[in-house]
């Protein structure tokens, strides 16, 4: 399929290209935005270039979809988000990040709402999960507001940033919409 574009209220979700590396580096090099992310902040634009390549390869392989977020009528990519994995009639796992200059303006409330709707209606997934690192209360607040349920804490389930990390699992079923 051609890359799916999503429009929601003020925003457009578009495919990421090499042209967006500079804007994405702003997010992925920001230590505060990356505090709860499952990887270290990017050191240089080469890190971000490799990320964009990986995301594009995974999209081609049909295993994930990752969008850039921008305001309608502008070009700057202010955030990124997507499905790290998805399976029709099965499970999808989402992730999302916004450039810190745009926090607390309701942008991710809009963007995640649009992405979840797309997941249930177009990708036909049955269940959407978000994995939150303990301490990321803003992300938890966003998910609760969007009708996700806190389902539990998986103790030291992942290893990243050099340490064993616990995950809080949030889930939403198609029947919860
Ligand atoms: C989590 C994140 C995406 C939220 O994006 P955002 O666009 O600022 O969120 P919104 O403005 O839509 O707000 C969502 C809710 O969180 C609350 N919120 C947002 N930022 C907050 C803050 N700094 N302190 C307290 N509450 C906050 C909002 O008030 C809103 O709840 P409300 O409507 O009940 O008031 C953003 O903080 C981010 O990119 N963080 C770094 C990356 C990250 O941690 N991603 C999640 C990985 S699981």
Image (cartoon, helix red, strand yellow):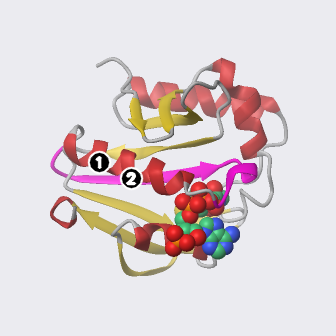
* Residue labelled with disc 1: 117
- Residue located 22% across and 61% down the image: 177
Which disc, if any, is residue 113?
A: 2
114 over 149 or under it: above or below: above
Which dot marks residue 44? none
Asked if labels 2 and 1 touch by Cβ distance under 8 angstroms, the answer is yes
Measured from the top left, where is residue 25 in percent x and y?
A: 76, 37
Instruction: Examine the rendering and report whether any part of residue 164 can be seen.
Output: no
Q: Which residue is found at the position 78% from the left and 40% from the top?
A: 26
The residue shown at (63%, 34%) is 51
- Give the extent of the magenta segment: 88-104
What secondary structure is found at the residue carrying circle 2?
A: helix
Pick the quarter of the image with the N terminus. top left
Q: Quadrant of ligand 1?
A: bottom right
Instruction: Kindly indicate the quadrant of the structure image that contains residue 72.
Output: top right
Residue 47: name its quadrant.
top right
Residue 89 location in percent, x, y?
15, 49
């Amino acid at each position: 399929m051609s890359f799916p574009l999503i429009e929601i209220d003020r925003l457009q979700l578009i495919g990421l290209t090499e042209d967006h590396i500079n804007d994405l580096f702003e997010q992925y090099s920001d230590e505060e935005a990356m505090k709860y992310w499952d990887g270290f902040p990017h050191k240089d634009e080469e890190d971000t270039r490799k990320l964009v390549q990986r995301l594009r390869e995974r999209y081609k392989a049909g295993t994930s979809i990752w969008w850039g977020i921008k305001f309608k009528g502008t070009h700057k990519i202010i955030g990124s988000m997507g499905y790290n994995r998805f399976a029709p009639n099965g499970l999808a796992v989402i992730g999302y990040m916004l450039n810190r200059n745009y926090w607390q303006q309701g942008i991710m409330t809009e963007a995640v709402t649009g992405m979840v709707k797309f997941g249930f209606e177009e990708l036909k997934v049955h269940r959407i999960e978000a994995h939150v690192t303990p301490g990321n209360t803003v992300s938890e607040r966003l998910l609760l507001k969007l009708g996700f349920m806190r389902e539990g804490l998986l103790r030291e389930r992942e290893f990243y940033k050099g340490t064993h990390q616990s995950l809080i699992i949030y889930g939403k079923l198609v029947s919860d919409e």
